[in-house]
Image (tube, grey):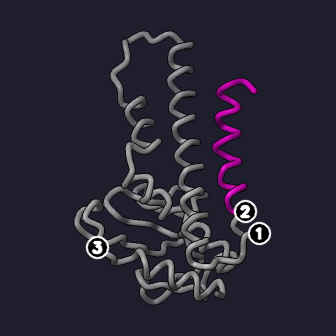
Amino acid sequence: MTPRDCYLAVWNAFAGRPFSDVSGRGLLVFYVSPGPCPSDVLSIGERGKFYPDGRIAIARGTLPRDPCEPDPAGALPDVASELAILAHEIGHFLCYLHGPSGYERHKGIVNAASPPRTRPRRAWARRAKSMRFIVEEERAAWEHASALLAQFAFTEWDAFERERHEALRGYESHLAELLGR
């Protein structure tokens, strides 16, 4: 299957399909322009994002006429790389279905009430534990993405591994900084 055909097959299998676990709707996959975006869509540097309400945003340099319809022709930097990002975000959805996700556990730590004068060591330990949950979630989403793409006869594994490596590198280096490694 060509990367374009695989892209369309994955999109069509998940976008608009009824998942009762996601607000009774299917996933809404849509394109947004990269760069400064409203904070509720993508942060600067993000190439994609899954939201528990069933939205998946994918960054695009040039938006198609209908940002909610699949457009492999405009993929950045290429179809296989963007498909890896899309599959990764669907991987977050699959993590969400199996919950609690690493992000939910991270938010539980961040939102937990802390004593007024928390010792710096305790604050550091909370941040490190929280970051471990995030790294765990990211790795799990990439594992789901790999399994998903294998089901659709994906062949561009070099592009997938590049995207995976680049995405995980930032999270893992931040965790290493917190742990002093």
Residue 159 coordinates in the image, percent (x, y): 73, 70
Residue 110: image tag: none
Above/below status of 168 relative to 13:
above
Residue under label 2: 161
**For the residues bearing labels 2 and 1, Cβ distance under 8 angstroms:** yes
Outermost residue on the left side: it is 24
The residue located at (71%, 56%) in the rendering is: 166
Q: Is residue 164 left or right of residue 32?
A: right
Taking the magenta stretch, the answer to whether it contains residue 177 is yes
Taking the magenta stretch, the answer to whether it contains residue 85 is no
Q: Nearer the viewer, residue 64 or 12?
A: 12
Indicate the amino acid at tag 2: Glu
Considering the numbered disc 3 on the image, is that residue within a helix, a strand or a loop?
Answer: loop
Magenta segment? 162-181
Above/below status of 83 relative to 178:
below
Q: CA distance from mark 1 to mark 3?
A: 32 Å
The residue located at (70%, 30%) in the rendering is: 177
Q: CA distance from mark 2 to mark 1?
A: 5 Å
**For the residues bearing labels 1 and 3, Cβ distance under 8 angstroms:** no
Residue under label 1: 158
The residue located at (61%, 58%) in the rendering is: 45
The residue located at (53%, 72%) in the rendering is: 33
Residue 82 coordinates in the image, percent (x, y): 61, 73
Q: Is residue 59 left or right of residue 116?
A: right
Res 18 quadrant in image: bottom left
Q: Is residue 88 left or right of residue 108?
A: right
Indicate the amino acid at tag 3: Pro
- The 10 Å Cα crowd at callout 3, few under 14, some 14 to 19, many 20 or more, is few
Residue under label 3: 18
Task: State whether the magenta stretch is mostly helix, strand or loop.
Answer: helix
Res 172 quadrant in image: top right
